[in-house]
Each structure stands twice: as structure tokens, then as C-alpha cells.
Amino acid sequence: MSDNVVARRSAAAGIDVCTLKRPPANALGLPIIEGLQAALDEAADAKVVVISSEVPGFFAAGADIKHMSTVDAKSFTEYGDKLRGVLDRLAAADKITIAAVDGLALGGGLELAMACALRVGSASAKFGLPEVKLGLIPGAGGTQRLPRLVGRGRALDIMLTGRQVPAEEAHAMGLIDRLVPAGTAEKAALELAAELVTASLPAQRAVIRTVDAAFDLPLDQGFRYEVEQEQELFESGEAREGLTAFLEKRPPKFA
Ligand SMILES: CCCCCCCCCCCCC/C=C/C(=O)SCCNC(=O)CCNC(=O)[C@H](O)C(C)(C)COP(=O)(O)OP(=O)(O)OC[C@H]1O[C@@H](n2cnc3c(N)ncnc32)[C@H](O)[C@@H]1OP(=O)(O)O
């Protein structure tokens, strides 16, 4: 079981924070992977989950190199599957996930942030996929998620050089969604969460599914998928509640 290197707390109604605390670099070894799984189990009722770090200077420095250097190919695959499993769970979560990045998000650490729906980065954050410097490639979704966020050229620049991208550049290219002053990423992420939590989570999840589908479907099928999602929500009662609340001039009570 993890040695409690991921602390979950409720920050406000419907908003949980999962904080990584595995000094010196939040290396994504089994303790953090298992800790994240347990924290997500505990955050089952949250509508928004913020992933942050209390380790100075780091969001997460990537897969645990100290461990990687000791394992055989079978363990490498097994560990990779565990890491990919928790990131895929984050990406598919039935809630909105936000990465709050104040420090270095490198390798699997950036892949963790990219598995979240949104990213808030502070001026002190830097981002990179330096795996080629280790003779590896980003093996936890980075080669798939980064181009979708920043485009093929910028993704290749980042992955082929392994360089660290400063927060301002990351924001300009769309790798992070909000750029905030140094040291304030978690606070800003909680402010964003407070904005998100007033809307319909089923509708927000349908937006994410539909936008993600746009990268895989031909345009005409994407339009059809959008209509299907809209119809499903309308029949689900969410829209009925939203429309009624508007006319009654009161906050909606969504599912
Ligand atoms: C139990 C089973 C485990 C099996 C493991 C199998 C792995 C399978 C993986 C599957 C695929 C996953 C895809 C993801 C891959 C990756 O993420 S690869 C790693 C990518 N990340 C990096 O390359 C960053 C490596 N770190 C650095 O470049 C530097 O540390 C830094 C971040 C630029 C900071 O440099 P500096 O300020 O000089 O500090 P350091 O002394 O280098 O580091 C401080 C301490 O932190 C430790 N550390 C840093 N990064 C890691 C890391 N990724 N893993 C483990 N430990 C790390 C570093 O060793 C120092 O520790 P101490 O020496 O003890 O102080």
C-alpha cells in the first residue's frame, strides 16, 4: 500500500484536492501510483478534482528513474501499465480534473498533467518530455496527448529536444490553460474549480467527450456525435432543470 504520498482533502462542496508529497521530486513510483488510485477512490463524490504538489520545485519529475534502473523488461511493462492505468482513469474520470503546476512537470509528470482535463500553470512551472535523453520515449500517453494540445510541430520540438518549456511559452502554445503568478497554481485551480462546479457535470463531461471525438472522427460523424450527446442530455433532465431554473431565476440543481 502507498506510504500516504498522496493526500486527498475536500476543499469545498464538490471540489477535492489530491496533493502529491513524495520528496525530493514526486517521482511516479508505485507509492504515488497506488496513492493516486486510493485518492481517486476517496474523491468518488467530487465533481472537480485538483491534482497539486507540496514538494518544492516539483509537480512531478516523471517515472521513478531510481526504480527503472533496477527492473527487467517485464517489470518495466507492468509498472508502465500501472502508471498508464491511473492516468487513463484520470482522463476518463466522471468528473473534471485540473492539474495545478507550480514546479517541474517532466516526463510522466507532464503526462499526468495532460491526462487531466485542464491545466493551471504558475510562472514558476516548467514542462518537458525529456525521455529521449534516457533512451526512452514518453510512454504514458505523451506522444498522443501532447500533439493534440499543441500541434505536431511544437510536440516534436519538445519531445525531440527534451527541453523544458517555461510556463509563459506553455500557455502561449496551449499546453496550459491558465497562467498565474508563481506559487499560486493550486489557489488558481481552486478558483477555476469553483467556476466549474456550478454547471452541469454531465453536460461538461459530454463536452469533453465530444471535443475529444473531434480528433478521431471525420467532420460529418463528429457533428452527428455532437447531436447525439445533446439529445441524450436533453432527455436526461439536466437541460430541463437548467432551462427551468433560468426561467425561475434561481441557481440550477444539477445531478
Ligand atoms: C517499483 C516498480 C518501478 C519500475 C519502474 C519502471 C518504469 C516504467 C515506465 C513506463 C513508461 C512511463 C513513461 C514515463 C517515463 C518517464 O517519466 S522517464 C523520466 C522523465 N523525467 C526525467 O528525465 C527528469 C529526471 N530528472 C532531472 O532531469 C533532474 O532531476 C531535474 C528534474 C532537472 C532536477 O535537477 P536538479 O535540480 O539538478 O536536481 P537532481 O539532483 O537531479 O534531483 C533532485 C533529486 O530528485 C531525484 N529525481 C529527480 N527526478 C527523478 C525521477 N524521475 N525519478 C527518481 N528520482 C528523481 C534525483 O535523483 C535527486 O535525488 P537525490 O539524489 O536523492 O537528492
Image (spheres, rainbow, N blue to C red):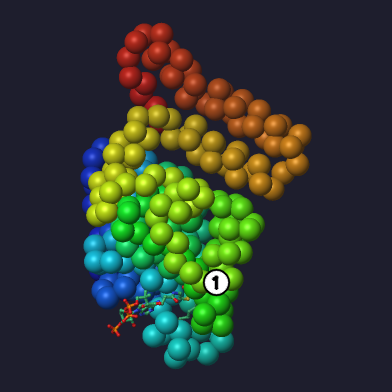
Q: Nearer the viewer, residue 123 or 240?
A: 123
Q: Which residue is rendered at x = 31% and y = 66% of the image? A: 58
Q: Which residue is rendered at x = 58% and y = 60% of the image? A: 155
Q: Position of residue 72 (x, y in %)?
A: 52, 90
As drawn, 72 above or below 164? below
User: Can I make out residue 10 in this image?
Assistant: yes
Q: Which residue is mark 1?
A: 161
**In the image: residue 184, left or right of residue 146:** left
In the structure shown, which secondary structural element does the residue marked by tag 1 occupy?
helix
Q: Which residue is rendered at x = 35% and y = 30% of the image? A: 198
**In the image: residue 178, left or right of residue 142:** left
As drawn, 152 above or below 210? below
Which quadrant of the figure shows ligand 1? Answer: bottom left
Q: Quadrant of residue 105?
A: bottom left
Type of the residue with mark 1? Thr
Q: Position of residue 96 (x, y in %)?
A: 42, 44
Q: Position of residue 199 (x, y in %)?
A: 40, 29
Crowd class of label 1 (few under 14; some 14 to 19; many from 20; radius 10 Å)? some
